[in-house]
Image (cartoon, rainbow, N blue to C red):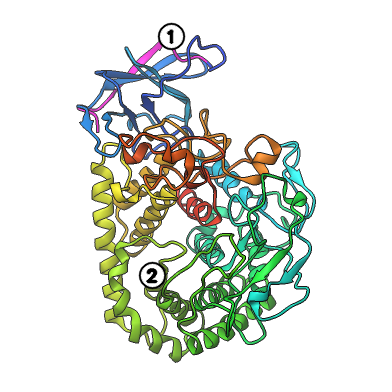
Amino acid sequence: MSARPARLLLALILPACLSLAQSPSAPSLEIKVDQVGYLPTAPKIALVSAAGTSFRVLRVKDGVQVLEGKLSAAVADRDTKDKVASADFSSLRQSGEYCLEVPGVGRSWPFQIGPDVFTRIYYLGMRAFYGQRCGTEVDLGPEFPGFKYPACHLHGEFHTSSGKSGRRDNVGGWHDAGDYGRYVVNSNISVANLMWTWELYGQRLQKISLYIPESGRGTPDLLAETRWNLEWMLKMQDEDGGVFHKQTSERFIGFVAPDADKSISYVVGTGSEPYKSTCATAGLAAVGAIAARVYQPFDAAFAARSLQAAEKAWRWALAHPGVVFKNPKGVLTGEYGDAQCGDELLWAAGELWRSTGKPEYNAYFLTHWATFKGSLSVEDNWRELAPMGLWTYAMAQRKGEDPAVVTAIKQNSVAAAQKVADRTLANPYRVSLLSKDYIWGSNSVAATHGIALLIADHFAPTPKFREAAADNLHYLLGRNAFSLSFVTQVGAHPFAHPHHRPSGALGKPWPGLLSGGPNAGRQDPILAKLSAEVPPAKVFLDVEESYAGNEVAINWQSAFVFLVASQLP
């Protein structure tokens, strides 16, 4: 917060904040704003990492000064080594395009204020999934000319590790990340995040068209896009109910367009009986149960098919509770290994209970939930699914639930969110990340912290939770140490070189993709070259080759979409 509230001024004509094209100098990277913008009634904070005492907000179209204020005292941030002051312009509520100027430092990138500033970002974030489709022609249309490719990966086979042989054309799904593999375990959390987005915020999304081939056919576009991947996941289920772990080539291919990848797309198994993995299977049981709920009003037949697959997967997973996946010999693509699948089983039990009300799922959940109740302090991701199981049980409102367990889950969720919110609002960069969180996919950690805050707000409406969730979104959209929007083609200064094969092949970034973000683990040669003195929140380079920092992934993308949807009118 600033040292004192900023005060509105009489309009003064100033030349400092005309359009970028007219400006004699580039905006200062020392001034950090959400380059998309702010809601009219929400807190509006900019951050400054250079010496200054005051700030002014200027209207972009004519350079009119509309507000001035004092910067707060600078505070040292241990994760960036910056000294950060804040500029609070929350009193400015009039819609428009603005920038912020700090005398002696410079001006910010432009940003919007308005009730629907995040609508286009939601659109681009969801359209990014369409751009990841496999097995069909993709074309972003005249809005993004050239962003297209023909149907890809139309031929598949069983890998020897699957216990089967011959052709298996599991056409469909989304390319998982910067590569062309498809992975059930990561698909599980990705489609779950999107279906939960619909359950919590569907009323805000109904009228937003994604301009996908299924638009206008009766199913909301978010669910239509999600179904594209769900259909592929259902194809990964074997006759006995178990689910194969992934479908990939044996090795990562070069930076070619999707249709230029002629390597065989293999259905990969564990290499020995029973060939399917528990985590993939239990995860499908969970998402199939969610699909049974959300698609029921729009396609009852698909909802029923999803539930049937979910219950079949549940029975297999109960019979095979400890089959973990390791890459079999000769397969070098992403492993997505997980040493234990009890959290997936808990999640599946919670979702099946919520969707069916059958006592067997309630009994399993109540027998096992206490083992995972401490996990509410850990964000959900592709490996840690217990929070999803706990949250869905607390939301189920089914006859026969244990009210004491529901109360405990809600109280623990709120207590965990309170800690996240407190540290977010106290952080000089107003982000929830701790030093340990600057890992591979740290931007996803920020987004999933936002999910935890929003779920807790669902249990106990708390303005501070919503504010902290929005702060994490502001961080992703430019209010960070780099003054960089971590989403391609979003904002005036977005990252531009994702580790993403379609972008590399095209020579320009596909729109709406969230970068993995700073990664103190430095697991690629690019980041490994950075000096050991670089602090954790600055271990990042916008370089295509930096797969540990600049890759994209559908689970990160889904968490980002959830966070953006919470800000829509």
Q: Are marks 1 and 2 in contact (CB under 8 Å)?
A: no
* Residue 98 coordinates in the image, percent (x, y): 45, 24
Query: Which is more toward the observer, 96 or 465?
Result: 465
Q: Is residue 28 above or below residue 273?
A: above
Query: Which is more toward the observer, 503 or 457?
Result: 503
Q: Residue at x 48, y 76 (%)?
A: 324
Q: Is residue 434 visible?
A: no
Q: Residues within 10 Å of mark 1 (few under 14, many from 20)?
A: some
Instruction: Report the amino acid beneath label 1.
Output: Ile
On the rendered structure, is 158 left or right of 333?
right
Query: Which is more toward the observer, 168 or 92?
Result: 168
Q: Which residue is mark 1?
A: 13
| Span shown in magenta | 1-18
* Residue 364 coordinates in the image, percent (x, y): 40, 87
* Residue 205 coordinates in the image, percent (x, y): 57, 54
Q: Is residue 421 above or below residue 79?
A: below
Q: Is 268 one of the magenta-colored residues?
A: no
Q: Residue at x 41, y 48 (%)?
A: 442
What predominant SS class does the magenta segment belong to?
loop
Res 391 label:
2
